[in-house]
Image (cartoon, grey):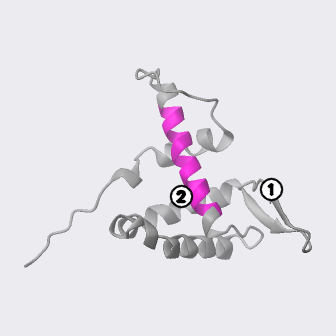
């Protein structure tokens, strides 16, 4: 959901349709920054989302998502991936499911390594 100031009249909410190529760039950027996300507290991740949104805009000049739109789309992609994974596995836990979206199906394979669940293992030296 994005917000637009409609000529000073007020704030208007509208749905942002992510193009497939920009969505793929979002996944690739999020993968690239995985280790940094793991090491950064949630309140400090705004800067990472700003960088990702700028990189998407550089690669796709006609599409300029905000950091919030990038974070929301990322969370939607993860949720959609989990939903489709449950459906494909027969949903043995009985979680609520919904019909997969185009992006859920289109990017399921791209997300199948679940890279966002991998934590960094670093040696600490004293």
At a point 33% along the width and 69% down the height, the residue shown is: 39
Q: Quadrant of residue 53?
A: bottom right
- The answer to the question of whether label 1 and label 2 lie on touching residues, with beta carbons closer than 8 A, is no
Question: Magenta residues, as a range?
Answer: 69-85
Residue 27 - label: 2
Q: Which residue is at a point 75% across and 53% down the rendered structure image?
A: 17
By secondary structure, the bulk of the magenta-drawn segment is best described as helix
Q: Nearer the viewer, residue 117 or 21?
A: 117
Name the residue at 43% across, 65% down.
Answer: 42
Report crowding for label 1: few under 14, some 14 to 19, many 20 or more residues within 10 A (C-alpha): few
| For discs 1 and 2, the disc positioned in front in the rendered view | 1
Q: Looking at the figure, which quarter contains the N terminus?
A: bottom right
Image: 52 above or below 104:
below
Residue 22 percent across, percent down from the top left: 66, 61
Q: Residues within 10 Å of mark 2 (few under 14, many from 20)?
A: some
Q: Callout 2: helix, strand or loop?
A: helix
Q: Position of residue 2 (x, y in %)?
A: 74, 61
């Amino acid at each position: 959901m994005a917000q637009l100031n409609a000529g000073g009249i007020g704030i208007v909410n509208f749905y942002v349709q992510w193009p497939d190529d920009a969505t793929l760039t979002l996944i690739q950027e999020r993968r690239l920054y995985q280790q940094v996300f793991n090491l950064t507290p949630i309140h400090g991740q705004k800067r990472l989302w700003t960088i990702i949104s700028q990189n998407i805009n550089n690669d796709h000049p006609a599409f300029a998502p905000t950091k919030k739109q990038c974070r929301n789309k990322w969370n939607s992609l993860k949720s959609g991936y989990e939903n489709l994974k449950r459906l494909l596995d027969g949903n043995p836990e009985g979680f609520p499911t919904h019909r997969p979206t185009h992006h859920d199906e289109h990017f399921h394979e791209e997300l199948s390594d679940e890279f966002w669940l991998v934590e960094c293992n670093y040696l600490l030296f004293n």
